[in-house]
Image (cartoon, grey):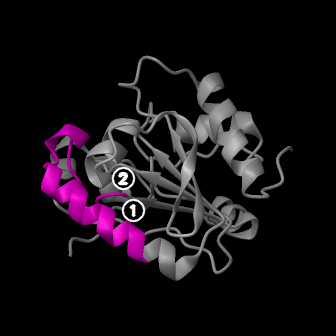
Amino acid sequence: MRGFIEGRRPTKDELAAFHGSTVDDLLPKKLNLLFVGINPGLWTAAVNAHFARPGNRFWPALYRAGITTIEVDASCGLPKAERAELEHKGIGISNICPIATARADELTKQQLREGGELLRGLVRKKKPKVVAVLGVTAYRQAFGNSKVAIGRSDEEFEGAELWILPNPSGLNAHETVDSLAKWYGDAARAAGVTLGR
């Protein structure tokens, strides 16, 4: 396992070394809401913090929704105080596929399916109230459900309420921080997470 870069932003050359690495899940003891990304990017793998790449709209959307009390900057790692706030609220973060790549479209369908089975096991073990998968196309590929749409699903996911939500990547031009905040806030309320600053 490669060592993580702590307390600073990685250089372009350093990022390439993290291809194929994994990132530690954020899993509080009491898990109300589990956000699930597609897979870690290289920046995320380098600093061991989910959605760490500058320009990713995950943290701004959580702040705008009132899920976090400050806008988190995870570009150098997830600060301890912000990690503690998420854990206190029962918010976790994982991925469909644990393997870091420069772009999600580098993953094979097989990797997504295998990652999906690992996610099923994690959800069975940790028993979150709500699972919010951030990426409808990746969900369809990982779980073979071509009919699933954005929003709260009629299906459960290993006993949890399932939400399929837009991916916060800057490459997703269909969404804004405000639209992401609305979706993420709705899923958080469904999980019983208290919103507001």
Q: Which amino acid does label 2 sit on?
A: Thr
Quarter of the C terminus within the rendering: top right
Question: Does 138 appear in magenta?
Answer: no
Residue 39 in percent (x, y) is at 31, 52
Along the viewing direction, whichever of 61 and 163 lies nearer the viewer: 163
- Asked whether the beta carbons under mark 1 and mark 2 sit within 8 Å of each other, the answer is yes
Label 2, residues with CA under 10 Å away: few <14, some 14-19, many ≥20: many
Along the viewing direction, whichever of 23 and 110 lies nearer the viewer: 110
Residue 109 in percent (x, y) is at 16, 50
Quarter of the N terminus within the rendering: bottom left
Stretch in magenta: 96-121
Q: Specify the quadrant of the image occupied by residue 21.
A: bottom left
Residue 184 in percent (x, y) is at 64, 41
Question: Does 103 appear in magenta?
Answer: yes
Q: What residue sits right under mark 1 in the picture? A: 48
Q: What residue sits right under mark 2 in the picture? A: 44
Q: What residue type is labelled 1?
A: Asn
Residue 36 visible at all: yes
Which residue corresponds to the image point at 69% horizontal and 63% vertical from the top-left? 81
Label 1, residues with CA under 10 Å away: few <14, some 14-19, many ≥20: many
Q: Which SS class for mark 1?
A: loop
Q: As drawn, is 54 to the left or to the right of 182?
A: left
Residue 72 in percent (x, y) is at 62, 46
